[in-house]
Image (cartoon, rainbow, N blue to C red):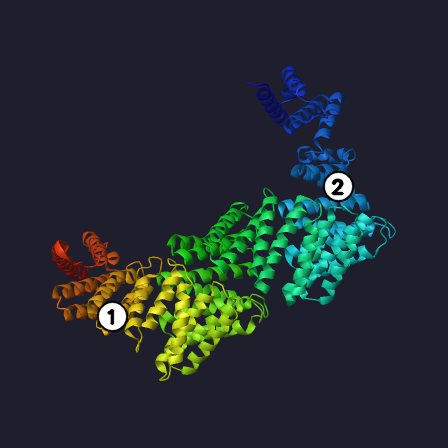
Amino acid sequence: MGEDDRVDADVEELRTRVRRFADGDVAAVTSAEAASVAARVAASVELGQSVGVRRLQALGMYHLARFQALDAEMDLKRAMALFQALYPVRPDLVPEGLHSLLAESVDGSDLLRRALDEEDAELLDAAIEVLTGQAEDGQAAVLANLGTGLVERFHLAGDVDDLDAAVNTFRRAVDAAAADDPQRPAFLSYLGSALRERFESRGVPADLDAAVVAHEQAAAAQVTSRALRAVILHNLGNVLVDRFRQRGSADDVATAIRVLRAAIAMTEDGDSRRVSIHNSIAVASRARFDRWGDADDLDAARDELLAATSLPGTTFSLVNAWNNLGTTMAARFETSGDLADLDTAITHLDRAARLADGTPSQADVLMNLGNTLLTRYEQRGADADLEEAIRNLTRAVERSDADDPALAVRLSNLGLGYGDRFEHTGDPADLAEAVSACERAVELSVDHAQRADMLSNLGNLVGVAAGHSGALLDLDAAVAALVETTGSLPEGHPDGPRYQNNLGLAWLARFERTSLAADLDAAVEALRVAVARVRPDSPERSGYLCNLGSALRTRHFAVGDPADLDAAIVLFEQALDALPEGHRDRNGMLGNLGSALTERALRTPSGGDDRRRALACLRRAAMGNPEDSPSRALQEFHLGTALTAAGATELEISDGLAALAKTVAADGAAPSLRLSAARTAGRAAHASGEHSLALAAYRVALLLLPRVSGRRLRRTDQEFHLGEVSGLVGDAAGCAIGLGRHDEALELLEQGRCVLWNQQVSSYGLAGREHAADPVAAQRLKEILSLLDEDALRPAFSRGGMRQVSAVLRERHALVRRGELLDELKELLVRLSRY
């Protein structure tokens, strides 16, 4: 046993002996054995040195008990000396009856300084307890120190009761100080800062007004110290900016900037506080830009931050300055559209991230860097930016504490990053990660406003999931989330247009599944509101115009009003004009405009100009996307559909079929899009006399059918997709018969029948419902359904040479096997129906 272990054992024995004395065993503390144990513990304690509090307490309680037993003054003196050493560190371990005696010998202000310097929470508790006793005399300086301790404990523990106590204590300090007390302006500034923090915590407007008044009174007082005056003016400027953000008073923000410039004038060259004050001026200018959109304010913020980053300062202040400079340049890009601003933003944020390594600011900086990289990816489409964005957003989440109120926002941004990658690669794992992150963000939201943001992002991603999976349940969840979001916002909220746009898209996707006029009307209305409310110079406006155009185009299909199609084309043109050349969204805009022009050309006798414009737009849209991207697959589908439309030349039809084939072959595209492309190609080839090619296209469409109507979807989703392709099996079989391939026609009919039987049985849940009545039959039913699913997904029939002979034999064997399975399926259904 080591020396420390032996001392710890002696300490525990002393504690036991004191408990025995309390129970009436006097000898437990008066015996020679007890004295021997105490002596060994005392030998390990040297007053004035750092020692364990358990040893001090055990010895102190032993000598106090011995004094009570023997009335020996020496024991009392020893006990008081031990407790006096213990009291400044852990007053809670000292008998309460001794506190008033010991407090007089301890300097609470000195104890507070030690606690703040050492960042020791236990020492801070001790300092607050001592200062609370000493503040009963009402000395202003002691009260101010007590208030400072309470604010610091609020920062550490988050207990708003400490903040309330701090506000009351600072008020007492101000009242206790004489009017000519040189410290009174500082006490007023402390009071204002505590009130500001309470406003940030509770959101009570009266606290913000009271904070402004306290800081104004501090600034109006006579202050001889230039350094103190700089601090007072800095605090006043910051609180005025807070009030401007809440109420939008031009006087508040103008006064804030004037006061902050005066604060800089009070500092000396080389003063590290200049970095923070320049940063505060930039924050004020940025707040004014955010409210009124004047680009001059954004440039003013940039200039202040450039000045801040050129000065010496603390790591904390420089991280803030570089981070704010980066986000300001990103905002400048959104206004100017100049990609050089975006590159500069990323450079500044990367520097901030390196400076912030290991600091509390690191997670926020990483999030801002990740978001800005996503913005550049959206502009240039560089995979490296997307991967780096997700890496930084992941690190931001990993470096967040579980109870960090900003964790929800960081998770939501990470989810949006994964969503962008899913749209690029089509990998379902990315979509699952995206939805999971955004769902967790909603769960962790700390207030109603944050929950609205998180729900909106989740609604967008669930809508993307619905577009890929075809599940109506996902769309219902998206609409519900977005309705809740828009309903929670006050009139004029700056995010209102974005939420309305997202809601309109969700309603539009739902209409495409339900065909309910109410869903389509709700989509058009929400998107009209988004366009009407968005700022004319907002970079989001082009997207909102395009989305409204898509809704009107959809309504043209549903209702047949040519005015809707004309309005949609105008909106697509406006959206395209609002985007600079090279913007990654131009391809989507060109695709939408081209498709709408194609539709109008087909409906108008003299639609030649529309058709020529349409094909030009669609070709540019397709070529503007990478070969393997899901966006390229969608644009190739639009191009193929236009090229194979009525009135097309033989060359156009050939080019159109090639474009459709690219969509069918795109593994990352949604199965429903690939199926539509295959069927469109089949019809076009059949109409142009290419019957063998048509049959091949139909076979691919049938191969994809189980993927959009499989048993993983709900019954309503299965029925919807099967309804979409009604007649596909007949078209395919008829094409085979026309070519004289009767065996193949039978095989196609049987393959389609497998899908239909499977859907019919699965959608009514017979296997699960009858499992208890006949588990063997129910299990076999599940096995047959799985076999039929696998059979429906077999590769297409092949022909040629010896392979043709083998293929024919395999097909005939498959037909026999499939027939046997269907016969067994019928028998099982009859058997189960008896229950």
Residue placed most toward the observer, 348 or 619 = 619
Q: Residue furthest front?
A: 651
Judged left or right of residue 732, residue 76 is right
Judged left or right of residue 608, residue 81 is right
Q: Is residue 761 above or below residue 134?
A: below
Dot 2 surroundings within 10 Å: few (below 14), some, or many (20 or more)?
Answer: many
Q: Residue 627 sits in which quadrant?
A: bottom left
Q: Residue 54 sits in which quadrant?
A: top right
Q: Position of residue 346 (x, y in %)?
A: 57, 53
Q: Position of residue 128 (x, y in %)?
A: 71, 41
Q: Which mark is residue 131?
A: 2
The residue mark sitting in front, 1 or 2, is 1
Q: Is residue 594 above or below residue 193?
A: below
The residue sitting at 26% across, 56% down in the picture is: 768
Which residue does the numbered mark 1 point to in the structure image? Answer: 685
Dot 1 surroundings within 10 Å: few (below 14), some, or many (20 or more)?
Answer: many
Instruction: Give the residue type at disc 1.
Output: Ala
Viewport quadrant of the N terminus: top right
Q: Is tag 1's residue or tag 2's residue first in the polypeptide sequence?
A: 2
Q: Position of residue 766 (x, y in %)?
A: 24, 60
Judged left or right of residue 409, residue 814 is left
Q: Position of residue 51 (x, y in %)?
A: 66, 26
Say what secondary structure mark 1 lies in. helix
The answer to whether residue 373 of the structure is visible from this angle is yes
Viewport quadrant of the C terminus: bottom left
